[in-house]
Amino acid sequence: MADTTHKFSIHETQNVKDLLKEHGFPVFRYAQIENAIYKNFITDFHAIETIPKPLRELLSEHCFYDSLEVDTNKTSANGQTTKLLFKTKGWEHIEAVIMRHLTGRVTLCISCQAGCPMACSFCATWKLGLLRNLDYHEIVEQVLFAAKLLNDEGNKLRNIVYMGMGEPMINYDNVADSIRSITDQKKLDLANRRITVSTCGIVPGIKRFTDDFPQTSLAISLHAPNDEIRKSIMPVDHTYPLKDLMASLDDYVAKTNKRIFYEYIMINGVNDHIALAHELGKLLQGKLAHVNFIPYNPWEGTNSDGYTTTPRFIIEKFQSILQHYWVISTIRATMWDDIDAACGQLANKKQ
Ligand code: SF4
């Protein structure tokens, strides 16, 4: 990896524009650089043939592209899932996962922090603790790497979920900048509605997000319909209990008229008692909600809590009970058992 100590990222648009101006290059040169980086996925400044050689040299001298280095690139046996493990300049490991759905839809799951401080008991990532927030260009580079990989195989990246390592609402500014870059028409030009930010329930972050990104989708890691169980598996509930969380979500829906995705991980004997399905139904009845049940994925070597997956028939029972309350739900397909693609699993082993 190049020495980047005194350089800035090529994704820092204003800095690059200032550099060009300072050295007397016309404004249209930035558009050519932008086109090469974000539309043609060129990562080597010397390979940008649309700009003059002195400008290529200037970029090489002052800018860097390689915030991340690919450590592992593993695709599942069925070809549907690709797990990307990146190494940052600080030698932390972070993950991104490409999911090629049978419908033809392609989704990329990205990380916003190395590790995570939120300590959800069912998650592999938090065992690392928070190593650090990712810079915005480290988030963007995960997307660009996956977009190029998909482009090379004739696929197009259309959906991004911030559901990898880390809690987006506590790295809000970098996440916000990355969304602006990803949706910029002159850059990656993804539709806002095809981007989903997932939070464990940081209420002030949800309020900012509602005001800043009313077109972008929101997912909530709910995982329990009452504070007692939620507190036992998600410490965030001590700070932001369900009453406050639901009030902030009602405000999001009132302002955006968008459906919220509620993630509910099914852990045997922990949050899957049938009475809880009724509580969940009552909690979400009449709201613009979509529940996604996630069968718990035991992560080898790091599962100190001894959790196991809820039997399929109980998950289906939860679904039928939610129907009774007119709440839409789906069960997430497990696409990745052979490549350790559950959040934090691979990085945890490496770290
Ligand atoms: S589930 Fe998300 S918020 Fe909770 S510890 Fe894991 S990465 Fe952090």
Image (cartoon, rainbow, N blue to C red):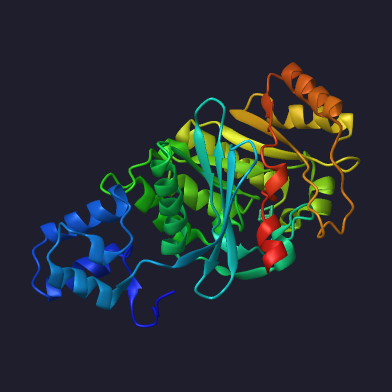
Quarter assignment of residue 79: top right
Query: Where is residue 147 drawn, in percent x and y?
Result: 41, 46
Q: Between 52 and 169, which is closer to the camera in this rendering?
A: 52
The picture places residue 295, in percent across and down from the top left corner, at 77, 37
Viewer-closest of 112 and 89 = 89
Question: Where residue 135 sits in the image (x, y, percent)?
Answer: 46, 66
Which residue sits at x=79%, y=21%?
A: 321
Residue at 56% from the left image edge and 31% from the top image edge: 101
Residue ID at (68%, 23%) = 327
- Residue 112, compared with residue 297, is above or below; it is below
In the picture shown, does residue 1 fall above or below 221? Answer: below
Q: Position of residue 176 (x, y in %)?
A: 43, 55
Q: Residue at x 59, y 41 (%)?
A: 81
Horizontally, residue 301 falls left or right of residue 109, namely: right
Q: Give the left or right position of residue 13, taking residue 144 as reference.
A: left
Query: Considering depth in this image, is 170 or 301 the residue closer to the camera?
Result: 301
Residue 234, placed above or below residue 324: below
190 sits left or right of 341 in the view: left
Q: Quadrant of the N terminus?
A: bottom left
Ligand 1 sits in quadrant: bottom right
Nearer the observer, 247 or 266? 266
* Displayed quadrant of residue 115: bottom right
The number of numbered discs placed on residues in the rendered structure image is: 0
**What residue occupies the far front of the structure in this picture?**
77
Where on the picture, by quarter, is residue 116? bottom right
Q: Quadrant of the C terminus?
A: bottom right
